[in-house]
Amino acid sequence: MVDFSARRELPGLVYPEAYLARLADELSHRFTGIFATETVERYVLESYTGLLRTSKVKAHLAGQTARFATDRLTALAQAKGEYAHDVPEVLFVCEQNAGRSQMAAVITAALSGGRVHVRSAGSMPAAELNPSVVEAITELGLDVGEAFPKPLTDDVVQAADIVVTMGCGDACPIYPGKTYQDWDLTDPAGLPLEDVRVIRDQITAKVEAMLASLGVAPEGASA
């Protein structure tokens, strides 16, 4: 059990929400020996402010900040070789992280059956997922209940083996040793559901091809 009362505050550090201090303590304990307390605190505050810019439902902000900060620190630990890197890491990036990249992440996770780990991000994230995208994915029996738009950060790029961009220009930093792909897909923003279904199916085909290149047979396919 972490003793929150014994927490050492950084000089001048002010948390706008009490839960951020608790989250920083929890993550400092989780990443003990990997990151200094100051690093964890900075990541928590950066993650909070990054999501606050676009968040519409403040009631969800605490949980989203916890997931975002945890994932970013995990990615940084992977990039530094402090965490196991047992399966390929794929990062999907589009402009708003509300449509194409979210569909690609959910479909990849489902088809790979955990044999590929996925993340997604946006160069200019939207406030919420595209409702038509949510419906199109739900039609496949897949769940996007915990998905939310996230800003693109350097740490998740460093942790990725494959970075797939979708119309986000030069926003994604380039690191040696990574595989970069650009998928030419229509932005589903503002399109009717029938058009979003077409994009969803195009993404599914591209995901299947990517998994094949990694030697991963899609779930449900014969060996």
Image (cartoon, rainbow, N blue to C red):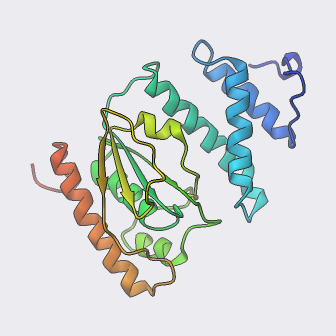
In this rendered view, identify the residue nearer to me: 223 or 137: 137
Residue occupying the far top of the picture: 33
On screen, 73 above or below 194? above
Rendered location of residue 7, percent (x, y): 84, 19
Residue occupying the far front of the picture: 170
Q: Does residue 80 appear to the left or right of 48 in the view shown?
A: left
Rendered location of residue 154, percent (x, y): 52, 39
- Residue plotted at (44% across, 71% down): 138
Rendered location of residue 78, percent (x, y): 45, 27
Rendered location of residue 219, percent (x, y): 23, 53
- Residue plotted at (34% across, 70% down): 185
- Residue plotted at (77% across, 57% down): 59
- Residue plotted at (56% across, 37% down): 72
Q: Does residue 174 appear to the left or right of 87 in the view shown?
A: right
In this rendered view, identify the residue nearer to me: 4 or 78: 78
In this rendered view, identify the residue nearer to me: 129 or 168: 168
User: Residue 31 sits in which quadrant?
Assistant: top right
User: Residue 88 sits in which quadrant?
Assistant: top left
In this rendered view, identify the residue nearer to me: 76 or 28: 76
Q: Does residue 85 appear to the left or right of 72 in the view shown?
A: left
